[in-house]
Image: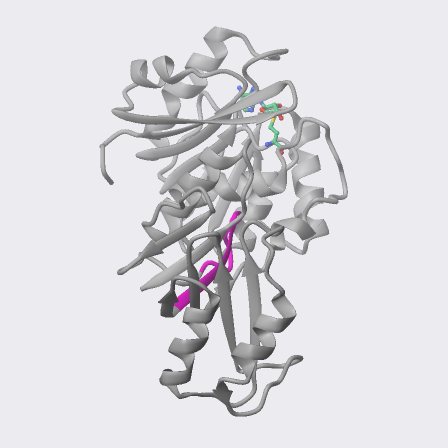
Amino acid sequence: MYLYITTRSETEKELIKAECYAITGANPDDNGIAIIDKPFNIDISKSAYIKTCLKIITHANDINDLYAQLDNLSLNSHRFRISVVKIPKKLEVDSQKVMHEVGARVEGNPDLSDPKTTFIVVITRDDVWFGEVLSESIKTWDEHIHKAQQYSSALPTRLARAMINLVASPNDKIIDPCCGSGTILIEAISMGIKAFGCDNNLLMVQASINNLRHFGINTMVALADARNIKGKFDAVVTDLPYGKNCPIDDKTCFEILDNLPNLALKSAIVTGLDISDLFMKVGYKKITVIPVPKGSLVRYIHVAYIIPDI
Ligand SMILES: C[S@@+](CC[C@H](N)C(=O)[O-])C[C@H]1O[C@@H](n2cnc3c(N)ncnc32)[C@H](O)[C@@H]1O
């Protein structure tokens, strides 16, 4: 059995759930914990919201039950470290004591700075899990927040990364047809996904190129209108300039959307309004809308498929 620990955020919970399911096949509970027998994936290093994947060694009802189980397990490991995660953080459990007690039940040498094995104790109000960490998020989206050319209209890097994870995997080829300053392209390429972009504003094309270069990335960004572009991709991932304070009109928005099924069978598209009815009109058969509120603004991520269940 595998256990995933996700970020907990009331406002982003739908997106966190969707990303966790897309990457692992498991749905997190209210504690942000997802457990599954046969996951799609144990490498969550590129995830935006999954923090840790562990292989469960044992489950206990409380911490004393865990100690008793460990006494019988005869664990043996060289260069190990114990980490403790409490959910919620304010849970009244002494993490140092747990580390010490668990460490005393593992034979071998602890190595806190360069461990070969990290054991983890996950403690919630009702459960205690003990396991071995298999992968952790390396949070590279965090390094991309400060770009060479910043725009207030740019998508948050973490959100962009999660959107990509909803529809693409490493080695896929995606397109962002309204790429603006290149946030989606940067995130995709840094995850091992081939990504191409275009924008109908030359200044934004140049901004994308500068920002990609800033992070040592080279990819094609074209000056083009999303209504007319051609090509075959695994997915479209884009941030449509549509919604409150929208700079494009309904007709242009519809025409851009209408071209997307020609480019890929699946899309993750964020807008300032729920426009799932328009997705239906242009031929998408399965549409999930994920609201992501931030202050007075709500973004709507549309995950849309031309053929259901691909
Ligand atoms: C919301 S912004 C994208 C922001 C981008 N995700 C970022 O992080 O910088 C939308 C972009 O769509 C572009 N755009 C508007 N109409 C377009 C069209 N018909 N074809 C291509 N791009 C278009 C705008 O120039 C703008 O850069």
Q: Is residue 154 left or right of residue 135?
A: right
- Residue 259 vertical position relative to residue 168 in the rendered view, above or below: above
| Quadrant in the picture for the N terminus | bottom left
Residue under the point 56% across and 35% down: 222
Q: Is residue 223 visible?
A: no
Q: Quadrant of residue 148?
A: top right
Q: Is residue 211 rendered to the left or right of residue 249?
A: right
- Residue 29 placement, left or right of 200: left
Q: Tell me which segment is drawn in magenta.
A: 44-55
Q: Nearer the viewer, residue 117 or 126?
A: 126
Q: Quadrant of residue 185?
A: top right
Looking at the rendered image, the quarter that the C terminus falls into is: top left
The image quadrant of residue 272 is top right
Which residue is rendered at x = 59% and y = 46% of the image? 186
Q: Is residue 283 magenta?
A: no
Q: Is residue 226 above or below residue 43?
A: above
Q: Quadrant of ligand 1?
A: top right
Image location (x, y in percent) of residue 199? 58, 28
Depicted 83 relative to depicted 105: above or below: above
- Residue 209: horizontal and vertical position, in percent? 66, 42
How many numbered badges does the structure rendering display?
0
Can residue 140 be seen at all in this image of the molecule? Answer: yes
